[in-house]
Structures are given as C-alpha cells and as structure tokens.
Amino acid sequence: MPACPSLPSLRHWPRALLRVLMPSLCALCGSSCDDVVCDACRAAYAAARPARCAQCANPLHELAGGPGICGTCLRDPPAFDATVAAVDYAIPLDQLVLQLKFGARLVLAPWFARQIRDAVLARPALPLPDLLCPVPLGPGRLVERGFNQALEIARPLAAALGVACHPALAQRTLDTPAQSGVTPGARARNVRDAFAVIDPDLVEGRHVGLVDDVMTSGHTLGELAATFKRFGAARVTNFVFARTPPHL
C-alpha cells in the first residue's frame, strides 16, 4: 500500500499547483520563469560587477594601483565607511524600483536582497555588519505607502547574511520632502537632523548596516550614518539595491 503523503507535503500542493496553473512572469521581459526576474534578464542587467568606490559605490574608472576610493570621498569623507550596491539605477532596472516603491510589488524585495547578497559575496574582504537597520520612512510617507520598501529588503537580506534586523532601531523625526523632489544643492539641508536612534545601547561599538532601495546623492544615508556615529557606532556600511550614477 503506498504511503500517504505527509501533512507538510500536502500543504505545499496548493503552491505547486498555482505555479503550474499561473507561472511567474519576468518583471522585465514578461517571459515565463521561476523567479520574479528571469535568468536571462538577470545575466544581462544585474550580474555585472563594475569597479566602484568602496565608500560611496560610485563608478571608478581606474582601480589598478589606486586606493579604491573616489576623489570625492577622499576630499570630503562621508559619515559612512562603505557602500555595497548591487546595480546602477538605470534602465531597465529602475523600473523594478518603481514597481516596488510605488506599485507595491513586494515580491521584488527578496529578489533585491539576493542581488545585494551577491554583491556582498563579491567583496570577501568586506566585514559583515553586526546588525541591519532599514532607512526609516516618516509617519506620513509610511501611512501613504503602507509599507517601508527598505524594511521589505532588509528582512530577507538579514536572513541571507545571518545577521539581526532591527526595524525600529532608528526613527525619522522629520517628515521631509522626498529627496527626488529636492534640488541637489538642498538635499543635505533637507535631511539634516531628520533621524534619531531609539536604542543607543544596541549601537555603541557595533558595526551597523543601513539598508535602502536606492542611493542617489548619499545625503540621506550620510545623515543617518552620522546619527549612528554620534551614538557610538564603530562602523556604518550601506547596503543598497541601486546606485544612481553621479551624472543623474
């Protein structure tokens, strides 16, 4: 007599049947695939590891023999110590960011986290953080959107890296306008004193990892890193899915 399927296997039947009846479609090309982005699109758009500044993740045109730090960071060092970026914020991957942030396509967040993890693995000398903290949204923005995309990325990334995720470690004390709507020259002022650390004891002497979907000018992450440093963080590393090239 054949053995009866176990309860765990029975629980997986609806999900397996759904995959057969409604196969996943690539968010970029629309082809049928097993993931949110197909292997071909990932290989074409997200697999490259161009030379980047180790501190701010902007492109580096010459790395051989250099310090791995761009001239901007050498002249005016930011508060954060390192940045890991999976991809450039450019066509067509920018559309995935918009789908997550403004289309509430939350299934993209774990895929973003996996791309960040792969970028981390490509830098074996980079020390892993003790904990991850998503960049917090202001109360108004959180109510309007219904979720924090940085937190949706941070949770699976923390699991992939084997570190703790602390969603409430930092708080946004000012509901500032979105940086995308602020002129480049005003972005630093827009986020000045915009954050507070809720549990200083958890921060002192620790390596804090900040998680966000996109790093544009770096002012938001810089201000949050400076806040953590004031509360005794020993090191701050940014983990972002996309880095906006400096000319945008």
Image: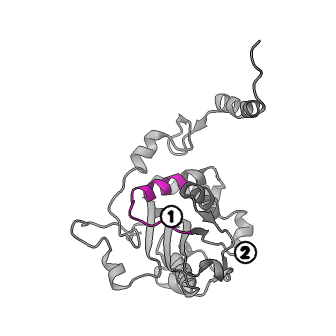
- Measured as percent of width and height from the top left, residue 70 is found at 32, 74
Q: Give 241 or 83, whichever is nearer the viewer.
A: 83
Return the residue at label 2. 139
Q: Amino acid at mark 1?
A: Val
SS class, disc 1: strand
- Residue at mark 1: 240
| SS assignment at label 2 | helix
Camera-near label (1 vs 2) is: 1
- Quadrant of the image for the N terminus? top right
- What residue span does the magenta drawing correspond to? 113-130
Q: Measuring from the top left, give residue 204's x and y in whole percent.
A: 58, 82
Residue 122 belongs to magenta span? yes
Seen from this angle, which residue lies furthest top? 1
Task: Give percent across and percent down for residue 195.
Answer: 63, 82
Residue 94 located within the stretch drawn in magenta: no
Between 11 and 162, the residue placed more toward the observer is 162
Q: Residue at x 70, y 64 (%)?
A: 145
